[in-house]
């Protein structure tokens, strides 16, 4: 089984808390986590609803392998309608909260409505209480986390919390758990704050049992761990350098978006790379990186624990930031570094700490700041808006200031909190927003990695690397090497990655395992744990069903094929240097083929046959 | 040969595989809250430290037990709780200076590390070698080897 088969439903408007059985008929079709919660959301809300209104719901959800010994089996997701994109949002996080929720006996927590006053949820196994949060409303994630731990005198409580940025309406606010893990993208934290829900604190002591075939499960789990340990990426590269192992690799192939994606290579990339995080500092001889860290059950341990140089201008008079905390991962190092032209590792780490402390997505923040810097360079944004700060590309001081005002939701920080799309529209230059469907790009330039252009354009949550990471194939050769500069075959590649990832995101496992694992490694673990005959084929079909359901949600929300596109810069301005010099992204060569192999009409709508084949109930989406 | 658990905190990543392996072996569920071995996180220092019973020779828990429910396993050196003898008085939990004997509210008896009868699951599950099961007469061997390697390098470089 592995599912607890229980859903906790919390109506924040009237304070009613109830328990209900998990819809096992849906679990058979959507597995868990991303897939299953999307099914619940699609059935329960109107996709056209105001994402920040009480009619939106926020679902915290685990997968069947969350809380088990399966390597990386500690993930949870937050599924809701995104205020940033208007699409379905599904943000995945590690740390320890997901496993704690499962151990408390719950597959899913569904939050409805809006609390009249700020509250947090205290959940100890079967006991769920909404507690007034007046004393922590208006404080950071880190402060609220500490306050709740102290209140209950329980260091083992696991806490997910939103910060000041979310409360102030930053549209890409995250939900931060365990101090520095985050359900980071698409503004799921903004939705949580809009419901006056400050935090969720969980203590689970029941454990996770009921594995369908425990001896088969342990055999599959142990085999999987060995595959991860023996693989060069998951066994060596990620533990040593974290996801930052990518920085120099991506820069070399000319796919490193730089200065709001004007360029594709960053001259300072080596200074902010995974290798640089190991280099002893001149001031105290210590490296930025203190240690690597694992999330629950993770045998890879790509997490970075870092310190900032105490003499650095950003923190020299702030002892609060002198300790170790979550360090830079590749996407953050890119967004806070290359995309704004800053190569000061300490300044990047400081901004990263602030993203964790007050809960906002470093990718969207960095990318929005990059657009603001370009507007400043053009003279459209001036010192009048910034209060005298020189918002120049390459300025570490500007980065530190911008991160501080965005964290607190003060002054120009409120404008940065709008995200790149709304900011650029406000200042009359929508073409400068490097977004798809309103969400900012991550760290792979689609001129140098063609397949990623299609992956971004068709991602169900807006621009995102985690919806179809064809970088694995186009750059790293996993599972097979393809040429990053050609479009041929990329429609099939993108579809395959999208479907597989949707399935993995529904298990409770981390997608980073797929650097080493194929579905042949994953399906046996799921099948041994769960009823329902989870073969490789069924997993992939489930992934395809999930992808199409998300698409149906977005179509019903008013997103159309017109939104399956890229910013003009990536379609018209050629890469200036590197292997992709002279190239744009040739999306038009891939998109029609993609619709065709998806079984969608030319307007990007799943055909009747596709709906029938996947058992999608489109009538439920009409509302 | 008697063996002992050896813990090297600098190798620990805090993943809790050991806690799950321990609880699964003892109770059949993955439940870190019931693990005999615990990982402590010192967040501001970026340190993870596994901690469990050292199986002391003159075991305080064993001597304190009024009903002789804690006994020495001659084969492994472990001090084991006899579930059917323990009366749940908790004196052992007070006697242990390290806090590694605890009381389980569900079973109403004391529980502690028993080295899994000579094949500790935590050591098997640890992905980084932070927990190993080694010659009890030579628990410093790995550290000695590490330092030996360094001194060899030094003289080679001198």
Image (cartoon, rainbow, N blue to C red):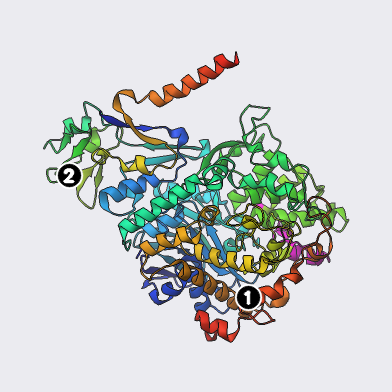
Quadrant housing residue A611: bottom right
Q: Which mark is residue B88?
A: 2
Q: Nearer the viewer, residue A482 or B20?
A: A482
Estimate the x, y position of residue A232 in percent, counting from the top left.
55, 45
Estimate the x, y position of residue A84 in percent, counting from the top left.
66, 66
Can you say which quadrant of the picture contains the C terminus of chain A?
bottom right
Q: On the rendered structure, is A544 left or right of A23?
A: right
In the displayed structure, A108 sits above or below B37; it is below
Estimate the x, y position of residue A466 in percent, counting from the top left.
60, 60
Mark 2 neighbour class, 10 Å CA radius: few under 14, some 14 to 19, many 20 or more: some
**Structural distance between the alpha carbons of marks 2 and 1:** 65 Å
Helix, strand or loop: magenta stretch: helix
Q: Chain of mark 1?
A: A
Q: Secondary structure at mark 2?
A: loop
The magenta stretch is A407-434
Q: Nearer the viewer, residue B52 or A447?
A: A447
Q: Residue at x 74, y 65 (%)?
A: A421
Q: Which mark is residue A212?
A: none
Estimate the x, y position of residue A210 in percent, counting from the top left.
31, 62
Q: Which mark is residue A597?
A: 1
Could you tell me if residue A410 is visible in this image? no
| Dot 2 and dot 1 within a common chain | no
Mark 1 neighbour class, 10 Å CA radius: few under 14, some 14 to 19, many 20 or more: few
Q: Chain of mark 2?
A: B
Can you say which quadrant of the picture contains the N terminus of chain A?
bottom left
Q: Is residue A423 magenta?
A: yes
Q: Is residue A154 magenta?
A: no
Could you tell me if residue B52 is visible in this image? yes
Quadrant housing residue A496: bottom right
Q: Nearer the viewer, residue A50 or A146?
A: A50
Q: On the rendered structure, is A105 left or right of A607?
A: left
Q: Residue at x 52, y 63 (%)?
A: A78
């Amino acid at each position: 089984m592995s599912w607890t088969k229980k859903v906790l439903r919390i109506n924040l408007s009237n304070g009613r808390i109830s328990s209900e059985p998990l819809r096992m008929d849906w679990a058979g079709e959507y597995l868990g986590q991303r897939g299953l919660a999307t099914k619940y959301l699609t059935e329960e809300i109107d996709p056209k609803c105001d994402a920040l209104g009480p009619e939106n719901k926020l679902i915290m959800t685990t997968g069947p392998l969350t809380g088990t010994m399966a390597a990386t089996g500690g993930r949870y997701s937050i599924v809701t309608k995104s205020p940033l994109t208007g699409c379905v949002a599904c943000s995945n996080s590690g740390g320890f909260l997901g496993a704690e929720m499962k151990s408390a006996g719950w597959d899913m927590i569904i939050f409805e409505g809006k609390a009249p006053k700020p509250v947090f949820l205290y959940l100890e196994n079967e006991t769920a209480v909404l507690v007034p949060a007046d004393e922590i409303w208006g404080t950071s994630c880190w402060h609220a986390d500490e306050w709740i731990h102290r209140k209950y005198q329980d260091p083992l409580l696991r806490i997910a919390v939103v910060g000041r940025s979310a409360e102030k309406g930053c549209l890409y606010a995250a939900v931060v758990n365990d101090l520095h893990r985050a359900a980071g993208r698409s503004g799921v934290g903004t939705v949580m704050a809009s419901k006056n829900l400050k935090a969720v604190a969980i203590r689970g002591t029941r454990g996770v049992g009921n594995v369908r075939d425990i001896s088969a499960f342990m055999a599959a789990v142990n085999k999987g761990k060995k595959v991860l340990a023996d693989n060069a990426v998951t066994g060596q590269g990620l533990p040593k350098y974290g996801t930052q192992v990518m920085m120099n690799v991506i820069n070399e192939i000319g796919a490193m978006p730089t200065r709001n994606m004007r360029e594709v290579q960053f001259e300072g990339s080596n200074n902010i790379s995974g290798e640089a995080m190991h280099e002893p500092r001149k001031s105290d001889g210590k490296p930025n990186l203190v240690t690597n860290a694992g999330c629950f059950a993770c045998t890879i341990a790509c997490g970075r624990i870092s310190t900032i140089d105490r003499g650095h201008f950003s923190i020299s008079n702030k002892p609060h930031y002198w300790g170790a905390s979550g360090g830079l991962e590749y996407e953050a190092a890119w967004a806070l570094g290359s995309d704004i032209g800053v190569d000061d590792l300490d300044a990047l780490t400081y901004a990263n700490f602030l993203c964790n402390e007050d809960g906002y997505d470093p990718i969207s923040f960095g990318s929005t700041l990059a657009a603001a810097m370009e507007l400043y360079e053009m003279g459209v944004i001036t010192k009048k808006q910034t209060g005298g700060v020189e918002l120049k590309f390459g300025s570490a001081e500007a980065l530190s200031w911008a991160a501080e005002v965005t964290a607190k939701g003060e002054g120009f920080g409120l404008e940065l909190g709008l995200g790149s799309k709304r900011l650029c529209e406000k200042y009359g230059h929508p073409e400068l927003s490097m977004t798809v469907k309103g969400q900012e790009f991550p760290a792979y330039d689609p001129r140098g990695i063609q397949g990623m252009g299609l992956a971004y354009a068709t991602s169900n949550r807006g621009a995102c690397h985690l919806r179809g990471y064809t970088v694995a194939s186009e750059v790293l050769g996993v599972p097979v090497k393809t040429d990053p500069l050609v479009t041929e075959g990329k429609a099939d590649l993108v579809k395959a990655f999208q479907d597989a990832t949707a399935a993995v995101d529904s298990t409770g496992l981390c997608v980073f395992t797929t650097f080493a694992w194929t579905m042949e490694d994953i399906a046996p673990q799921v099948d041994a744990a769960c009823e329902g005959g989870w073969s490789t084929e069924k997993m992939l079909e489930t992934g395809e069903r999930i992808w199409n359901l998300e698409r149906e949600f977005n179509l019903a929300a008013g997103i159309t094929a017109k939104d399956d596109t890229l910013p003009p810069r990536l379609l018209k301005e050629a890469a200036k240097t590197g292997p992709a010099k002279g190239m744009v992204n040739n999306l038009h060569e891939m998109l029609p083929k993609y619709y065709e192999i998806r079984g969608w009409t030319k307007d990007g709508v799943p055909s009747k046959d596709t709906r029938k084949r996947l058992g999608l109930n489109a009538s439920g989406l009409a509302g | 040969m008697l063996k002992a658990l050896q813990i090297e905190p600098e190798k620990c990543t805090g993943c809790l595989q050991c806690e799950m392996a321990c609880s699964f072996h003892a109770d059949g569920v993955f439940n870190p809250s019931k693990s005999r071995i615990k990982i402590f996180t010192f967040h501001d220092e970026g340190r993870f430290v596994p901690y469990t019973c050292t199986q002391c020779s003159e075991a305080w828990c064993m001597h304190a037990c009024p009903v002789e429910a804690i006994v020495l396993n001659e084969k492994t050196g472990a001090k084991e709780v006899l579930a059917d003898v323990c009366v749940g008085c908790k004196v052992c939990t007070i006697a242990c200076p390290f806090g590694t004997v605890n009381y389980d509210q569900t079973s109403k008896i004391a529980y502690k590390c028993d080295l899994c009868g000579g094949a500790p699951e935590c050591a098997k599950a640890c992905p980084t070698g932070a927990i190993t099961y080694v010659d009890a007469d030579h628990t410093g061997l790995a550290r000695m080897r590490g330092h030996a390697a360094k001194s060899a390098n030094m003289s080679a470089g001198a």
